[in-house]
Every structure is written in structure tokens, then in C-alpha cells.
Image: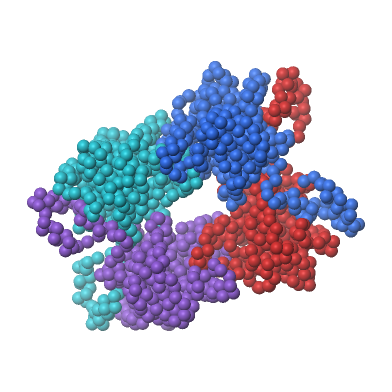
Chain colours: A purple, B red, C blue, D cyan
Amino acid sequence: MTQTPAKADRDAELSTAEKQLYEDFNRFGLIPLWTEREDLMPMTPAPQAVPHVWHWDDLYPLAARAGDLIPVGRGGERRAISVSNPGLPGLPYATPTLWAAIQYLGPNEVAPAHRHSQNAFRFVLEGEGVWTVVDSDPVAMRRGDLLLTPGWQFHGHHNPHPKPMAWLDGLDIPFVAATDTGFFEFGEDGVTDRSTPHRSRSERIWGHPGLRPLAATATDTPNSPLAAYRWEHTDAALTAQLEVAAEGHPGVVTEPGHAAVRFSNPTTGGDALTTIRTEMHRIAAGERTAAVRETGSSVWQVFDGTGAITLDGKRTDLVRGDVIAVPSWCEVAIEARTDLDLFRFSDAPIFERLNLARREYS
Amino acid sequence: MTQTPAKADRDAELSTAEKQLYEDFNRFGLIPLWTEREDLMPMTPAPQAVPHVWHWDDLYPLAARAGDLIPVGRGGERRAISVSNPGLPGLPYATPTLWAAIQYLGPNEVAPAHRHSQNAFRFVLEGEGVWTVVDSDPVAMRRGDLLLTPGWQFHGHHNPHPKPMAWLDGLDIPFVAATDTGFFEFGEDGVTDRSTPHRSRSERIWGHPGLRPLAATATDTPNSPLAAYRWEHTDAALTAQLEVAAEGHPGVVTEPGHAAVRFSNPTTGGDALTTIRTEMHRIAAGERTAAVRETGSSVWQVFDGTGAITLDGKRTDLVRGDVIAVPSWCEVAIEARTDLDLFRFSDAPIFERLNLARREYS
Amino acid sequence: MTQTPAKADRDAELSTAEKQLYEDFNRFGLIPLWTEREDLMPMTPAPQAVPHVWHWDDLYPLAARAGDLIPVGRGGERRAISVSNPGLPGLPYATPTLWAAIQYLGPNEVAPAHRHSQNAFRFVLEGEGVWTVVDSDPVAMRRGDLLLTPGWQFHGHHNPHPKPMAWLDGLDIPFVAATDTGFFEFGEDGVTDRSTPHRSRSERIWGHPGLRPLAATATDTPNSPLAAYRWEHTDAALTAQLEVAAEGHPGVVTEPGHAAVRFSNPTTGGDALTTIRTEMHRIAAGERTAAVRETGSSVWQVFDGTGAITLDGKRTDLVRGDVIAVPSWCEVAIEARTDLDLFRFSDAPIFERLNLARREYS
Amino acid sequence: MTQTPAKADRDAELSTAEKQLYEDFNRFGLIPLWTEREDLMPMTPAPQAVPHVWHWDDLYPLAARAGDLIPVGRGGERRAISVSNPGLPGLPYATPTLWAAIQYLGPNEVAPAHRHSQNAFRFVLEGEGVWTVVDSDPVAMRRGDLLLTPGWQFHGHHNPHPKPMAWLDGLDIPFVAATDTGFFEFGEDGVTDRSTPHRSRSERIWGHPGLRPLAATATDTPNSPLAAYRWEHTDAALTAQLEVAAEGHPGVVTEPGHAAVRFSNPTTGGDALTTIRTEMHRIAAGERTAAVRETGSSVWQVFDGTGAITLDGKRTDLVRGDVIAVPSWCEVAIEARTDLDLFRFSDAPIFERLNLARREYS
């Protein structure tokens, strides 16, 4: 919204009365629409954020170095290093609404408990051995798992093992910051429960397909009560979609050779988090997705395999761990060289609720 | 609504003008409220249906005899024998809204495909070896499983094995009959797919905890898209509830020693069928449920274990396979001698949607 | 469900073993489906209720005679005379789910307060001067008005004037009776507030188009908080629809020459009552509605004008005050000789919520 | 998010390895959370926007001067002058999500038709004589009226009279800009219908209390189908609330002496616009509202009367036309010297849908 050459030209032509008018606008804290309309209300979304790819092979060593140098305790709270979209310089934002970071926890370290209105998840690219303790329920983290920490639930992490672990954190920090809706609170200095169960209580109660507990407390909740979505289930679901499609049954996959699931809230069938959509995609080797634009932004991470992504016409090769920011209305198409698994998160639930969602296939 | 003695007395005292008035009401097809109010609008529900228990040990041999004598083909469609509530004589109704039957399919028999607006399920007390084919998807039936055939989906059954199999059928036939909302249509004479997969396509696509397919066809549906709820999952969910409660965590079970799950529609979190609630309960040996009354009726079947049920003060021993009809507002309490598993279905979703649901603990 | 000739023939051919089987079914409280399927599950709805028309000119004099002979106090509660569908002999039911009656209140009479889970409304064909007091809010009754008494709200009526008044009562009594979900409670012997305001408090708070009070109590409610829908608004809405359509704007009327409004709950946009849909229709002189069948039943009352209704092919002339019962799946078409205004109520909200609604144009 | 003194101090103490680490973060487009957490995730909302008041007596003369100097045609589209929050310098934003402007249309001028995904409304402080034409429906603008132009509906304005008119425009421009979800399209150069009806077609069809058209097109819509909420209704609703409360009935007003209505969508009972809540408040002379903080921001305009507003402890006198920006979590209390009517709009519907709404009374 800086002054464009066109505006400067126009300024030169202004009459004295007009100049005085613009000065008075300024004096009274006003801005005319007629000089701003094109910037404020473009014909199609014109994000400042740009498409960008970060490589896990760059991220992980930096996180490990931070592990040596930076303590993880109270204040900083988390050893998380966020990607910063080159179109949003100085801001730790993957997109205008989404925050994505690598978080690293060394052997025997503890990230102390806190809570915040921001919704959060962890997605595990590799490794295991850390437990995230969500409202006193210890949740094991293993490769391929999606772990939720919905807004205002206390959560800390602890690593009882001699090996470090790193993962992807996703939050709606930029959205909450832009709308001034965030609250934050410290919890206990450690984590409340250092036990290391294979399955969380949340999974034991809520992780059975189509089965809802009848306890009076098991009411509908805005965010999912299921704290962990395990890779074994996600993998099985994607595998089954491609197999059933291969057996000749229509309507099962997203498009030919492209299986996908959404992580959902079993109490409502809606998104697992109110502000963040989370999905896992599998594209069969040799297949290519239809090019598509959507309002709202997203972040992808390659979970496994190799391929390429084309963002507004620019093609980039993909390997395991790559993190990709996709701004609003950016045209996206993905090719799979090998079978290609990708995790995706986006802000789509916000705009679907507000009648602002649009999608267009090229 | 037959004439009571009180009315007869009153009739005797009527003036000539009054008698003429009542005759004229009758002539014009009218009935006054003031003689009917107490019957029509009782202070609390006054069902004609009565609490009643049928024994599987009576039902099964009769079904087997029917298997020898009655063919299963087109016209009769099903070798199903329904319980008839003694309070609703001559009507094949378990309660005013629910139909419950034992269905029996002999070796190599086929129950031909049809569809109807009535919602239906099968619950398997014992045995296995039949496939129900729902909209061309073959669904294996095994002990402890709940199988859905939502309204207007074609379904037939076939038994490719040398042993007969019997199960419990539940439908909303009386509700649909009372409201004149039923449609029926014949399908192919046989079943469309005689394959015998271990898992249906529906389970392969929808049977993963918290995971929703992203295909454009995977929209919200009024009934569950998941055709089978397998005993292994139900059992695990009930076991986990009791274990987590035993570990000292509150809010997990329905009441102390009483675990329960509802079979739900993963697209909405609501009931698996629009008109029929389906649940599985486990009561730990020695425990007793709180006595409760609810509007609407239900049918229970003992899946395993022994105990007793007290219905409006009358106690009956329970053994495996017993089928129990519970009318509206009947007080129910259940005791478990051994660990006691019970399947339950009810018409609660109808009344919850209509603001007519009430529950009262004694 | 009585024995048909076909069944009798079949019985004659039964083997001894078969006869014994049917006897044993009977002994154990069982009924086979294969002898009942056609009756239980017809191809299309086969209501026992029949189309029927009652005339206000018959109803009103009978109600007036009852006014002379029958007191209105506690016990009988109401001087209401219900229509009894000839297909449901002995039952005071207009259809299997709906109750319709003429209620008559003489000069200075009071119908004492009570409440019940059954939902109720009054529709005023003619006259004025009675107040219905709903949860202590006096609501004036005037020609053309629809007045609500949703389930479990106390209500009584009083007539402070020297002239009698009669109106149409509609309730879901048969539905609630069939499902055993009714509760009833007496209130005070009189009515709590004998004031006679022109507008009820409910209308003063809720009767402004598109405006919702912000008070903490103004939450969404299952039934409408608006106790009265006044004829002046209904008439204006119907008039406007026909005028706007006549000006050439599409999509405004239900079909050419046929304006209609639904009485709705301003907190949700849904039906004014959870179980009963209420509508007002205006058909321009000379127009004819498309013939249509719907699941569920309805009752119409001619508010003004003359015309004819054709029910399953049988045509009946209509004049002011006629009450018409339309069973499920009965084909309905209406012609207007003069401009014809009709009030309608139906059980459609029940079946729309349960996925049992169907409509078919001929 | 500029570097704070605390950060500068810390930088001075960094080891060489740490300095290298931060440089490498920068090189790879990364930002650590531990230096940002406090800014990014404050304990309570810490908006950059500040409370501010603009005066209509400043705004109107500037708008009138613009009317003399600035043409209103294609390109600029509108002669709208927006307030710019002093905490968001250079941005034409009242708050981070809301845009508020005075728009001025001279005699015989036309603001050409366009449409955009941004939701918009007009609120008329004074004057009349302009028609806003929304999807071809001419809607008269008069003092006290709220006029809607929901997202993606074509709209233009024309003033067929010899007097100018000015009003308040409200839009969700900043929210849509921050989330890159906006689309814009030009319509015809003029407006499609220059007729000047007293009531729009939208009001004739939808503006009857509790009455919904039955036409097939009258489905539920995300934004209200009612284009105008007239002052006569708003005033009557506020008057009635205070009167009914004065008669001694509880639960009618928002708090003692404080009446308020929300402009709602009659198809759902929800907010009139998906992203913008609109309300009218009346505070009786001498009354004072309870101090309250809410997440999300709002803009008020004094419609009539005098009083004062206290924002985070700072008290400002209020007169007719004053426009007040209230940032998120700012404590607000209002006193009425005379009876005081205030229009308010806010972004609350966004946060209520996302589980981010909080309110706290002091």
C-alpha cells in the first residue's frame, strides 16, 4: 500500500483545492477510497505472500544446532524455528494465516506446559520418542502421526530418551495475531505426567471407528477430542482408496491416482481443528493432480517419495521433508515420480464458514 | 379408547339435548375432546405396549423350523420372525415404533434384493458366514457386528456356507407404518455380488478412526456411510472405557462400572441411522445401573453374560440372547451377575430432534 | 392387518408341520414377516386415513350447541370438538399425526390453564375477543391470526366479551399418542393475567422483521418465541408476492398465481413448531395448483374465497371454513374460483428431519 | 514486531556460535520462536489498533468538499472516505478487520455498479433520497435504515434528487485483505434500475415478521435476503423492550435501561452478514452500561442523543454522528446523558464460529 508511480503522477496534477483536501484527510485521520481501491480490493486475490519451498535438510541441521545452543525452558517455551515467507519479510509466517516450524527436543529435555487460544498440531516426519502431554494426557509421537493441541488446552512435551527428536508444528498464530484474539497462559514448569504409554487416553476413548462414548462428558466439541491420528490408520485409509478404485469402483478417490483423507472431529464430522484443515494425500507414481486455485493459503510437507510441484507455473522438485507455502489463489499442481505422500494444512475451515471459499480448476 | 364405565355412567345422566348433541357429533364425524382428554393426553406416557422379554432359546429353534418349512424367495422376501408386544396384540411390533425379529438363512440360500424407506440394521448374536450386500457392497456378518442398511439402499443376503445363520433384525417399520411414510421396491432376484470379502468396501473407505475421505462424493449423509461396525472395535472401546476409569480418570464411563458406546455417523457425529439409535453397553460384574425412565421405547438384546433387568419394578433374569422390549417412560435398571454386554436400539433420535425427549433418574 | 382371502387360502394348504409352526409362533409372541410384508411395507404409502372434508357450517352450530350444554372447566379443560377421519373410526384424529378441532368459548368463559408436551396452535377463521394467555402473556385472537402454544407452555383462554368465539385448534396429539411421548400438567384454575392488550409482549419483543433482541435470554429455541402471527402481516406478504410476480420478477411465488408463506421461528428460520408446519396460501382466481403428492399428512382450512380441491382424483367444492384432511401420498390439486386463501398445517417437519420426506409432482 | 531494546541487549551477549546460528536462520528464511513468543502470543490481545473517535462534523464537510472536487465514476467507483486507525498508520482501516467510511453522493450522481466478495452495508445517519440498487433491486435509503449489500451482489447507487446525501459504509475489507480472499468485478456503468420505489422488492418479499416465502428459491442463504432494515421497525423494537421492562417483565433488555437488537438473517436466525455483526442500541438517559471486554473489534456510531464512552479508562463525550473504533479486548462502558441511540458493527460472527470469542465483564 505504498505510493505507486501512478499516484505520484496524479499528485502532480492536483489543484490547490485538491491538495488541501488530501492534506485535510490526513489531518483528520482519513484515507479516500478512490486512490486505494485497486490495492484494497483487487480483481482476484493478490497476496504479498509468495509460493516458497523450504528443505528439511536445511531445517533439521539448524534445529540441531539450536538444540546445542538454545535452552528450551520457560520464556522461550519451545525450541521452534518457523519458516518466514519471503513475501512477508521479518514476519515468522508461512502464509498470512498459518505458522509452520520445526521443533526440536533433545534427549531428556522438557518443553514446559502452557496453553493459548491458538490451535496447534504436530506432524511427525521422522523419529519418535517424545510425548506431548495434552491436558494431562501423554500422547506418544511417532513417524506419520498427527497430534492435536486444540486452543486453550495445556500442553508440554518431554523426551525421556537418549535421542533427539524433531517435528513440524503448525498453528494459526498469524490469523490470531491479525485478529487480536489470542490469549496465553503458563502451566506447570514441567509436564504433569511423565508416563510413556503407547496410546493416549484420548485414543483409547475416542479412537474407534464410528463409535462414540456415551458418557455425559462426551458432548460435541468444536475441536476434535481425538489427540492423535496414527500413521497406521492414515496409511491404511489411503491404501484402501487406491485399491478400491483399482478394483473399478467410482467415487472413491479425489481424482485418478490421488487418494486423500481429512483428519476430522468425530463429534461433528467437521475439521479436526476449528481454524486449520489437516489432510494427508497420496499420489500414485506417474500421476499428476489437476491444477487448482483456492482462496486461502496452505502449507504442504512431503512425507515420503519424490515428485514435483508447480506453483503459478513455476515447477520445483520435491523430496522428503520439503515444506511448501502456497498463498491464496496460487495455482497448484503436483506430480508424483515415485508414490508420493504429502501432509497438508490450510485455513480453509475459516473461509468455508464465512462464505468466502472459492475453488477453480484450470 | 373404548368406552369406560365412567363414561357409561355419564351417558345415563345426559339430558335429551346432550344425547342429541353426541349423536350429531357422531353423524358429522366429530369427537368431543372433553370425554377423551384423559386418554388422549395422559399426565405421563401411558403406553399400550408392555415390558416383555423373549428368549433366544425359544426364538432360534422356531427360526430353524421355519428354515425347513418356509422358502425365502421373492414375495415373503425374508425369513424373519418378529416379536409381537403383548400389549399390541396382533401387531408384529416390539414397541409402537420399533420392529425386532430373528432372521434365519439356511445353507446356500439367498434372500433377494429389495429396498425400502424403512431404516434397518442386523446385529449378530452368534455365528457367521452370511454376507449382506448393501448397494452392491458385500458385507460379512460375524458375531458382535452391527450391520446397517439405511433407508432406500438395496440389500439382499446370501449364505455361501453349509451352515445356517440367524441374527437380530431391527427396523423402524412401526414408526413408518404409523406415519404412512414407507416405500418399497424389488431389486434383482439374487444379490448383485456373491463375493465374500472379509471387509466391505464401505469399511475400507470409511472405517478409519477420525479419517474422512476427500472424494467429492464423501459429503455429509443423513445415515452413516459405514456399513459395518465390527465387534473387535466395539469390544476394544468398551474395554478401554472401563480400564481408563479404573486408572482413576473421571468422565469416561456412563456411570461407575458401566461402559457404553453409540454407533455413529462419521460424517456428522450423529446417530448411525436417522430414526434408530444403536448402542452397546458393558456392565461390570456386580454393578447395577441407575434406574431411569426415558420418553420413547427401546429394545435390548443380551450379547453376553448373565444378570437381571427390572422394568417398572418387575425383575427378570437375563441370559445370552434375551430380547427385551422397554416401552416409553418404563423405569429400567440392569444388574450384572457376570460381566454383562447388551446391545440396545431405540427411537431416541426421533424425539431428540423434535424436542420431545425427556429422561428422569429415580 | 386382518386376514385376507389370500391368506385363508394359503392356510388351507398348510402342512401339519406348518400349522404347528404358526401355532408356536403365536404361543411365543411372534409373528412371521412373510405373511405380513405386503401390509407392513407397501410399495407406496397406503394410509388407513382417507381424504375428507368437513364444513364449518356444520361444525359451528354443533360447537354453539355444546356451548349451551357443556361446561368448559377443569377436567374436560376445553370445549373442543375434533374431526375424526372416517378411515380411523372412533379415533379423534384428522390424520394419523394431526388433530384438528373447533374450539368454542362463550361470553365471559374461561378455559383453565394447563400445559402439555403436545404442540398446539389456534387459527382464527372468524370473530375476535378471546385472549389466549401463554406462559402469562395475554395474546389477542382475531380473524386470520395464527397463535402458538408450543409444547410445555402453560396456556388458558378467556373471553371477556359478551359474544362467543370459535376457532380452529391444531395439535400433534395423534403423533405424540402413537409414540407415547406426552406429558400433561394442570395450571391455575383461571388464567394468570386477564388484561386484554392489543399486542402480546411476545409480539412486542419478537415481532419486528429481521430484528432479534440481544438480551441474554433471547437464545435459539426449538419452537418460535413469537406467539402471534397477525393477519395484517400474512395478508401483506401474500399480496406482495403476487404483485412482485405480476411486475415480472421470477422466483417469487410458489407457482404461477400461487403465493404462500410459512410461519417460521425467527431464532432459527425453521418451522414455527417442531412437529407442525404452518402455512398460508393464496391462489389467484382462475388459477390451479400443480397436482402433488407428499409423504406425511396435512389439514387445510379455507380462510376465504371459493374453489375446489381434487384429492386422489375426487373433486370437492370449497367454501369458507371447510376443513380438509389429506392423508400421506394423496394427490392434491386446488383450483380457485375467486381468489382463494387457505391455511394449511402438516407434519412435514418430522419427516424432513428424518430423511423420510418425498414429494412428487404428477 | 520490530527489534526491542531487550533483544538488542541479548544480541550483545551472544556467542559467536549463536550469532552464526541467527545469521543462518536468516539466510534460510527462518525465524526462531523463542525471540518472538511474547510479541506473537501475548497473554491477552495486544492490538496495534487503538481506541479512537472521529466526529461527523469533521467528516461531513470533508465529504462535501470531495463532492465538489472528485468525480464518482468508474475506477474510483465510490466517493468514500475511510477512517484510518491511528494505531495502523497509512492503512484505511478502522480496526484490523473492519472498514468504515463516509460516502457522499451529490445531486443526480451515480456510483456505478460493481460487486466484490467483501460484505458491505450502509447505515444512514441523516438525509435521504439515494437508492442503492442491489442485484437490480432499488432500495431507498432513509435516516436510521440499515441497507445490506452482501458479498458478490452487484450494487450501485444513484441520487435522483437535487440534494446531496452522505452515509456510513461498513465493510470487512481489512479482514478480506489480510486473508487474501477478495474478488472484484465491474458491472454496468450505470445502475440497472433507476426507479425509486418506497420499499424494495426484497422487503416486500422478506420483510414480514416470522413469515417465510415458500417459493423454491427461498432457501437458506449465508447472508440475509432482506436488503433493508427500516428505522421504524428498529425504533419500535427498542421502544418496546424498554416499555416491557418498565412494566416489570424480566429478561427483555440487555441490561437495565439498555435495549438492543441484532439485525438478523431471517432464513437462519443468524447475523445479517456472515462476517459482520450489526446492532442498534438504546440506552436510557442517565443509565450506564456495564464495562465489558470482547475479543474482536467493533465500530460504533452515535445515531442520536448525547453521552460518553469510556475506552480502557479514557472517557470521551459523544454527540450525534461520532464514529468510535474499539479494538479487541478494549474495555468499553457507555453512559447516556439523554436517551442515546447507537449503531454498532463488529467482527464477532467470525470468532464465534471459530471458538475464538471471549467476553469478560469488569
> Relative to B51, is C326 on the left or the right?
left
Query: Foreground residue, A61 or D180?
Result: D180
In the image, residue A146 lies at what x, y percent? 46, 71
Q: Is residue A107 above or below residue D116?
A: below
Q: Is residue B166 above or below residue A54?
A: above
Location of residue C291 (image quadrant): top right
Q: Is residue C41 visible?
A: yes
- Residue found at x 90% / y 57%: C15
> Relative to D137, is C121 on the left or the right?
right
Location of residue A123 (image quadrant): bottom left
- Residue found at x 63% / y 37%: C310
Q: How many labels sit on residues?
A: 0
- Residue found at x 33% / y 42%: D138
**Residue with the most extreme left position:** A16
In the image, residue B110 lies at what x, y percent? 75, 66
**Residue with the most extreme front position:** C286
Query: Foreground residue, C121 or A35?
Result: A35
Query: Foreground residue, A92 or B202?
Result: B202
Quadrant that contains the C terminus of chain A: bottom left
Q: Is residue D348 visible?
A: no
Q: Is residue C316 above or below residue C176?
A: above
In the image, residue A26 lies at what x, y percent? 15, 53
Q: Is residue D338 above or below residue C331?
A: above
**Residue with the most extreme top position:** C162
- Residue found at x 42% / y 51%: D222
**Residue with the most extreme right position:** C16
In the image, residue C8 lies at what x, y percent? 85, 49
Quadrant that contains the N terminus of chain A: bottom left
